Image (cartoon, coloured by chain):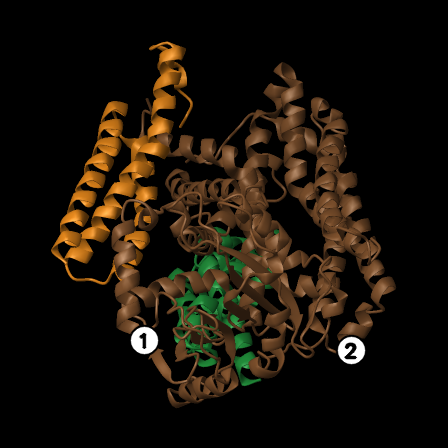
Chain colours: A brown, B green, C orange
Amino acid sequence: MFDTFRQAMAWVHTGFGLMLGYVLMVVFFFGTLSVFDREIDRWAVPETRFAVQPMPSFDQVLAPVFQRLRPDPDDVERTARRVAGELPDAASLPLVSLFAYTTHRDPVLLVGAEFGVPNAPLDPADDHLHVHGRAQVDPRSGEFLPENRLQIGTEFFYPMHYSLNASPAIIGYWVVGLAAMSMLAALVTGLVIHRRLLRELFTFRPRKRTQRSTLDLHNLTGVVALPFHFFFALTGLLIFAAIYLPVHDSLLQPLDRQHEVMEAARTGLPHEPAGVPAPLASVDAMVAQAKARWAQRGIPGEVGFLTIEHVGDRNGYVSVFRAGSDRVALVGEGIHFRASSGEILHEDPAPSAVHAVSEFLTGLHLQHFRHWLLRWLYVVGGLVGCVCIATGFIFFTERRKRQWALHSPQALRWVDAFAVTAVTGMVLAVLGMLVANRALPADLPARAMWEERVFWCTWLCTLLHAYVRSAALIRGEVSAAWREQCIGIAALAVLAVALNWMTTGDHLWHTVTTGYWPVAGVDASLLTVAFIAFTAAVRLDGRGAGATSTAVEPVEVSRG
Amino acid sequence: MADAAWLWLAAVGSFSGTVWLALAMPVHWAQVMSAAATRRHPALVLRCLGWLALAAALAACLSADAPTMAVLVWVMLLVPAALLVAMVLAWRPAILRCWGAAVYLRPGSSGR
Amino acid sequence: MARKPLRHRQPGALVRRSVLAARVFASLFGSYAFVWGASSLLIVAQVAGGIAWDEAWMVGMLVAFPGFLAVFLWSYSARSVLRVWVCLFGVGAATTVLAAQWQLRLLAGV
């Protein structure tokens, strides 16, 4: 079928690249934004613009918070469909486990809990039946933050990057998983079909035909950031390994369950509640003891994650995990205490070699570390990935442009419209959402939903705009949509910065001089984007029909 | 603060290293250097210099961070370094001339 | 490289397309079946060898994804589509059954 190995690899590269390239573009772009997800949260939720807080006192602050925490109504509704009989009043459901989570970049604290359900499940295999509740808390006061605020960074951009915010999310996970696998395949096949890998490592010829320079840029960005691309796609898959390859939950479930029980016996952490009520000892004392233990072991640190299992039961235990801000690997060094007495039940041993490797791999993707240079380098890597994917597309269409203009102009226009939508349209959708976030009234009901609607609508509009304004393609020119959307980006970015100033008073000069970097960084990045987009628009304007008509000359692809 | 200085050094080292590795390729040497210099292309020296600078950058990273973090920073620094080199070569290759001239600074080769 | 494709027209476009579709199908689902069985078997074999379950599972996952990539690419470079199907689905099914059987014996032995 394929004459040569290289030909087969080229087919895989082009086929899967075209099929899943758009998804990859989304994943890379929103992954890049997620590097600074918490900073975007601060920008989008002005109520949370205060200094980063450590884990607050459990006894003083968090215990009353968990007494006030209620199950999520949506989850109650979902669970009601899975059980026999009527669910009791949601407010009366008992709290069975809880967690509190913060990082070195969080002023707010995320708390969550599982509430027990007395009803029998409809499906007998449906164990671990709980309803969940979660909330954002101001750790200084213990107050819940207003519920109609969308933390755009962590609650929209971040999940977009691994689930496309699809509903149900599992569809998004699988599409993104397939895209990540295609990325790995595209990288390997790209190396195979690239003829002058080393000789043209630093080659970029911007003055040559669009097709030539696009391919140069595609090769350059692909090769230069190859380790980054490969390991981020691979570790992304590994993080969701349990979803993509759920052998532990199906074929090998008996072994998994056996291990759970054996593990409970080995560590002394009870797997099941005893059914006997017991009071909770001082959690603050346990936290102090955990910190002392870490200091003894030469790894002093703050608490990042705190959980209590079997709350109020004799078998209850408290787990205190260390925040991993000083390392790549995501290790908690958990110390576990008996909830009723505060005695240490178990201390996590040092990870084995295999676990150390996997924690390093997942940790390098999830970036809990405190290293701002590395964070920015990840942004560079992510954007380079976007350029690599986009140039791949553009090269593909440039090659076929003239042929298509003759035979199927409609197809050409749609393909180009999709490319515009995937590049400038995506940026416009993000900016539209940020503008909506600042422009919508603060007390609007379902405000979060409106922000999301603005995002999707803006994106759809950019597609229509890109199609409508693409008539110039038939004449072998660049679609006007590129330039117009660049101007749109510049305008919206400046508007977002201005709205932030008007609604909160935090203008760039103020945030920079007071050193409030989360908001200063987002504002400065927005202005940078505006500048780049404006420059691009000016340059696209300068390139008349003459400059680009050369783009449709016959091909001389990268072959030696 | 000292960490920031090491990381700056690492950035400079990885950029210089990539420049020298690029100059070790005849095409880029010709692109950057004047006609007189292009007659002799000290490829081996440039290649050695390049790898030395990259090694120095790694050492600087290791001085700033724990080893696992340092390796990650080093690998990631190469991305903007190589991109920058490619862009400068495309638009303003003359900027890189002083890196090329550095080869002639070594003892013994000045009076050729 | 792709400049002499006319030779491919010989078997007839329909046949050619269905062969390609079969290959794409096998490259995705066959590779998945293969990796599913092989990684399960690898995990069970480690557990049988006395390695803790969570560690065995982790090794299985660390091997599974690069393994998928390898067999995925192989399914395009292999000469015969029939061989791709037999190897991927056959080995996948066989290793799955083997892993399940071995697991049963392990659980019975404890």
- Residue indicated by mark 2: A513
Circle 2 chain: A
The one of A505 and C11 positioned closer to us in this rendering: A505
Along the line of sight, which residue is nearer the eye, A496 or A316? Answer: A316
Residue A253 image offset from top left, x and y in percent = 29, 50
* Amino acid type for the residue under numbered disc 1: Ala
Quadrant position of residue C98: top left
Which is more toward the observer, A417 or C98?
Answer: C98
Question: In the image, which disc is placed on residue A37?
Answer: none
Question: Can residue B107 be seen at all in this image of the molecule?
Answer: yes
Query: Are the residues flagged by discs 1 and 2 in contact, CB closer than 8 Å?
Result: no
Residue name at image x 84 percent, y 55 percent: A441
Q: Please state if A274 lies on the left or on the right of A535 as rendered.
A: left
Label 1 element class: loop
Q: Residue at x 59, y 30 (%)?
A: A398
Q: Amino acid at mark 2?
A: Thr
Q: Are marks 1 and 2 on the same chain?
A: yes
Q: Nearer the viewer, residue A147 or A339?
A: A339
Crowd band around label 2 with a 10 angstrom C-alpha radius: few (<14), some (14–19), many (20+): few
Q: Quadrant of the N terminus of chain A?
A: top left
At horizontal 49% and vertical 43% (from top left) the residue drawn is: A170
Q: Quadrant of the C terminus of chain A?
A: top left
Q: Earlier in the sequence, mark 1 or mark 2?
A: 1
Toward the right, the furthest residue is A502
Give residue A517's quadrant in the image. bottom right
What's the mark number on residue A350?
A: 1
Helix, strand or loop under label 2: helix
Residue A210 x, y percent position in the rendering: 62, 36
The image shows residue A455 at horizontal and vertical percentages of 71, 45
